[in-house]
Image (cartoon, rainbow, N blue to C red):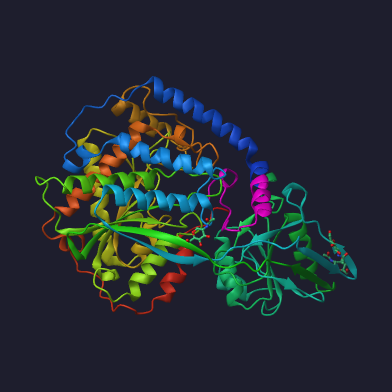
Amino acid sequence: MPSTNQVYNTDHHYGEKTNSSNKLTLAAIGVTIVLTIAVLGLAVATLIKVNQTISTETATTTSASLNSVLAESIRIQDVMGHLNELQRIATANNGNRAVSTSGFNQTLDYITNSLSIYTNYNVKTSFFTIRQFALVNNPILISSINGVVTNYTYSNDLSAADFYHIQFSIAANFASFQQISVIPGVGCSDDEWSKASVSPAGKVALVKRGICAFSDKGALAAKYNVQALLIYNDGASPDRISPIAIGLGQQNNLPALFLSYPVGQALADAALNTSSNTGVRLIINVENLPLSPIGNICADTPTGDATQTIVVGSHSDSNRLVFLGSGSAANLGLAIALARLFQTSSYEKYKYRIRFCWWGAEEIGLLGSDDHVKQAKVATAVGERLQDYLINLNYDMLGSPNYIFGIYDGRTANDATPTQALPGSNKISALFRGWFEGQKLPWDFTDFSGRSDYGPFLAEGIVAGGLFSGGDDIKTQEQRDRYDRLLGQGAGGIAGAIQDPCYHQPCDSIQNINPFAYEKMVQAAAYALEYLARQGDLQTYLYPDGRPTRTNGQSSRQKYDSINEYFRMPYL
Ligand SMILES: *[C@@H]1O[C@H](CO)[C@@H](O)[C@H](O)[C@H]1NC(C)=O
Ligand SMILES: *[C@@H]1O[C@H](CO)[C@@H](O)[C@H](O)[C@H]1NC(C)=O
Ligand SMILES: *[C@@H]1O[C@H](CO)[C@@H](O)[C@H](O)[C@H]1NC(C)=O
């Protein structure tokens, strides 16, 4: 799952890290490490503590019936085996499985090979393309204030840099100094853009960091036809002075740079001073790289009504600094366990087709699931159309060391969610809750605002639900005490520590999995799948008020454009 905006310093996916230049990647990683070295030390210390706590105190739950044949049939050691393989692939490929790397391709190979060995599912890999980004050389930023020319410093050591590049900036080569349009506030609304110092059209817009995703600022800048975009840090705290490494997303079509707070503020002050003459020159050379093909894998049960499909999804990519993939491995374990059960005559086949999917490029903006939904919107083949999908169950992170048993809370769906998807999504929340309570396990509701691959489905009115064991949120004292009470003294984890101390960090490896939590989450996922698949009329169960009426191929461009509202970049 992409990071939340809470702790910028603990996050490593500053945006669309898809450049293929080793130099740049290494530089970016170097920068990231410099930025987060202190936090990392803390995280590793916390992890060791969490693991010690958890390994010495075995959780003591009753071995209540799992209330599901599928859940009973899942062998956690099989799921851990898949996870070990993902770890092996990462280790053998510069430590990660990010898109546009050999580690990612090998991950897809592992998933498709496992499916073809252990299941009789119809497996299909669909490709979509993403932009790659790399600089040819260091960009140049020069200002002229009342004739005084300043050539600013670009450096991969961000603490020494006046400015830094922004991923997916396009090239620029300004022959002369261009006027600056200072956008008031933080440039997140039309109101602010329409009150700019001078009309932004054709000018270099200068915008302060804050409130909305950087991609939202970029979209507004494009809307107001700027010539280039300069974003600057806000100086709100000592760690918000230097420029930072961000991306503007795949859609960006503007030259853009990120400035330190002092440089940004000085330029804003000068540009706002009517008696001074201020302009900037930008030179940015970007490599002309081909689009990179990224695969989505979907595997269908050969039986079940294809016009009433249950989609079970997880993402196959890691970020650039390893991200283990507990969801992918669980999804594979689930798919294989179901295939095995279907091969036994005593287990009745499901009425509904199950489609297990592994989305690519989740970490850089839910690109795989978004592409799948876009394709489904225009598909005409039976079983491939959006109308053929009843629900999307999403499993992202399931084994965080200082875990919560997190259930997506249907009530926190984004305001833009079509109302028909809400009753069903709330039912899924209640279904999971009922299972955890029946198992005498603690549980928590967790954010459902669209920050993982269910987002594009939900935005189109498809019921969604799923589980999440925690990322960069802190486990509270109340949670720890409640988990202790139900799981046994000492098994509740650590209050005041983040739920996944290695979230999006190099220490996110096989050691960073809580096997007890992982097993329970996988069982809960199996339970929910079987429960839904055994409904006599799943469509009415999920859509008591009817389904959204849709004409396939209709444009809802606006809704898709708002994907960025669901996918909040972490570096506000
Ligand atoms: C990954 O697979 C794609 C699609 O087959 C291919 O175009 C690309 O070159 C591969 N990338 C790497 C790094 O192996
Ligand atoms: C600004 O500095 C860069 C390198 O730091 C240099 O390549 C460039 O020529 C300088 N431009 C001017 C106008 O001084
Ligand atoms: C505005 O610019 C003029 C001319 O450079 C300068 O004398 C004056 O101090 C500036 N005003 C402020 C508020 O900085």
Taking depth in this image into account, of 287 and 66 the one nearest to the observer is 287
Residue lying at the far left of the rendered structure: 346
Percent x, y of residue 105: 47, 54
Q: Name the residue at 50% across, 36% down.
A: 501
Question: Furthest-top residue in view?
Answer: 56
Residue 394 visible in the snapshot? yes
Q: Which of the 4 image quarters holds residue 51?
A: top left
Bounds of the magenta segment:
4-31
- Determine the residue located farthest toward the right in the rendered image: 147
Query: In the rendered structure, does residue 8 fall within the stretch colored magenta?
Result: yes
Q: Position of residue 34 (x, y in %)?
A: 68, 42
Asked if 79 appears above or below 425 in the picture, the reply is above
Q: Residue 566 at x, y = what percent? A: 44, 61
* Viewer-nearest residue: 245 or 4: 245
Give the residue at x 72% y 63%: 136
Q: Is residue 87 above or below residue 120?
A: above
199 is higher (above) or lower (below) than 295: below
Quadrant for the C terminus in the image? bottom right
Locate residue 330 relative to residue 505 in the image: left or right.
left
Residue 57 position by quadrant: top left
For the question of whether residue 3 can be seen, the reply is no
